[in-house]
Image (tube, rainbow, N blue to C red):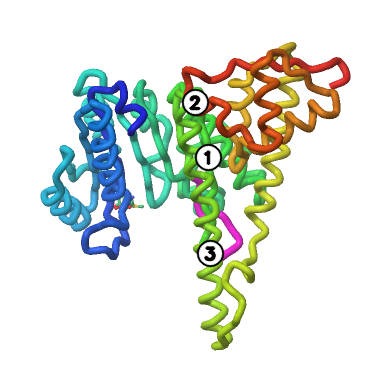
Amino acid sequence: MPIVGNWASDVAYIDCLAGPWESVDPDFQDTSFAQAIDVLIEARDLLAQRGKSPTMRCLLIERDGASFDKLKKYSEKTSGVEILPRNWDVAAHIPDVVRFAKERRNSFPFIFLDPKGWETLEIDLISPILALDPGEVLITFMTSFIARFLTDETKRFDRLFGADLPRLVTLQGEEREEELVHSYVNMVRRAGKFQYVCSLPVMKSNQDAFQFHMIYGTRHPRGIEVFKATEKNVIPFMHQARAKAQHRRRLEHSGQLTMLDPEAQYRERKFTRFRLKHLEIAKCELRRMLESSGQVLFDDAWAAVMQHSTVMEGDLAQWLNEWKTTGLLRITNDLGRKCLEKSKTNIWSGVGIKTSQQRPRIGMSHLPSF
Ligand SMILES: C[S@@+](CC[C@H](N)C(=O)[O-])C[C@H]1O[C@@H](n2cnc3c(N)ncnc32)[C@H](O)[C@@H]1O
């Protein structure tokens, strides 16, 4: 919001499945809509200091009557942004969502879809929302639920995966899980003509398993930067929360207090395995990019690898250094050399990739032996 608010005359937060759901806080501070509105208010104050004052609007949609009553009460007592709560079945109101997004000139809509299941994620249904340009989308993809029920024909996953379903049902375990996300990410990318789509797995608190993936579509590299910065904060937070949950369970089972802190006893294998695999996939993709063209712009290399879950700027810097040191890679301009030198001690920070206008156009070319 502080980024798009620099140029937009209006920003619109649209929560298509707003809840509240399983909220225990009387002020709903544990809900996505309340947190989003806090972010809007914070961004409004920040933008005001820069002399910018875009209007800020929210459309909060909820089908369930009891939840909607709470949503409406929250909306009535919240000030600072315009809030339009609607007791709609979003599936029947997609044109209204699009109308709301386009109602004002020079507006930037941010769409959030956080379903309990998957029905409202059918691409044909949400395509008009994904296609809003400018605009961005954040989707909760219930991976564990979808993977578990994929072969249940009554659940009609053909509507979600279309022609890809027969391939997906032949896969098992982690491969199925990963391909489901991959398939859906590609559909989101195509339907929204998003240049960049990032995803991030979120683990179950009580099992070494993924619960859902967050999928984020953007048309600007700044979007990737923000998503990756969030990823960097969220991953340690998730592991800390799981460590505490494991600690509590151990205490309940054994009844014995331990001197070791929860993080020292923390166990997980799934996430580490996932990260190692995705590092390898991203590195191979970058190698292929370099091998198939004479020169690759740093921006393109960066955007390609950053779209892989859990892959960070430091990983990219490490690969480039490794290839450069072993003589497989040549950096073709001065700016590039400067970046690489810096990355040895201080991974990319201060290099300028934080500001898109000044983003260095670094060329890389591979030697024949690559
Ligand atoms: C997982 S919850 C969202 C939770 C919310 N993000 C929060 O932080 O509280 C999904 C919500 O979508 C609502 N819902 C389900 N299908 C819907 C539909 N077709 N249209 C509108 N709302 C729907 C459910 O009643 C539920 O409150």
Residue in the picture at 25% in, 32% down: 49
Please, what secondary structure does the residue beneath circle 3 have? helix
Q: For the C terminus, which image quadrant?
A: top right
Label 1 environment density (alpha carbons within 10 Å; few <14, some 14–19, many ≥20): many
- Residue that sits furthest to the bottom in the current view: 255
Disc sitting over residue 333 in the figure: none
- Residue that sits furthest to the left in the current view: 76
Residue occupied by mark 2: 221
Residue occupied by mark 1: 199
> Range of the magenta residues?
206-213
Query: Is residue 207 within the magenta segment?
Result: yes
Residue in the picture at 54% in, 82% down: 251
Residue type beneath disc 1: Ser
Q: For the N terminus, which image quadrant?
A: top left
Instruction: Place residue 345 in its image quadrant.
Output: top right
Visible residue check, residue 50: yes
Residue occupied by mark 3: 242
The answer to whether marks 3 and 2 mark residues whose Cβ atoms lie closer than 8 Å is no
The mark that comes first in sequence, 3 or 2, is 2
Which is more toward the observer, 364 or 63? 364
Which is more toward the observer, 280 or 66? 280
Instruction: Place residue 28 in its image quadrant.
Output: bottom left
Q: Position of residue 291 (x, y in %)?
A: 77, 19
Label 3 environment density (alpha carbons within 10 Å; few <14, some 14–19, many ≥20): many
For marks 2 and 1, give the CA distance: 15 Å
Residue type beneath disc 2: Pro
Residue in the picture at 45% in, 30% down: 223
The mark that comes first in sequence, 2 or 1, is 1
- Residue that sits furthest to the top in the current view: 294
Visible residue check, residue 149: no
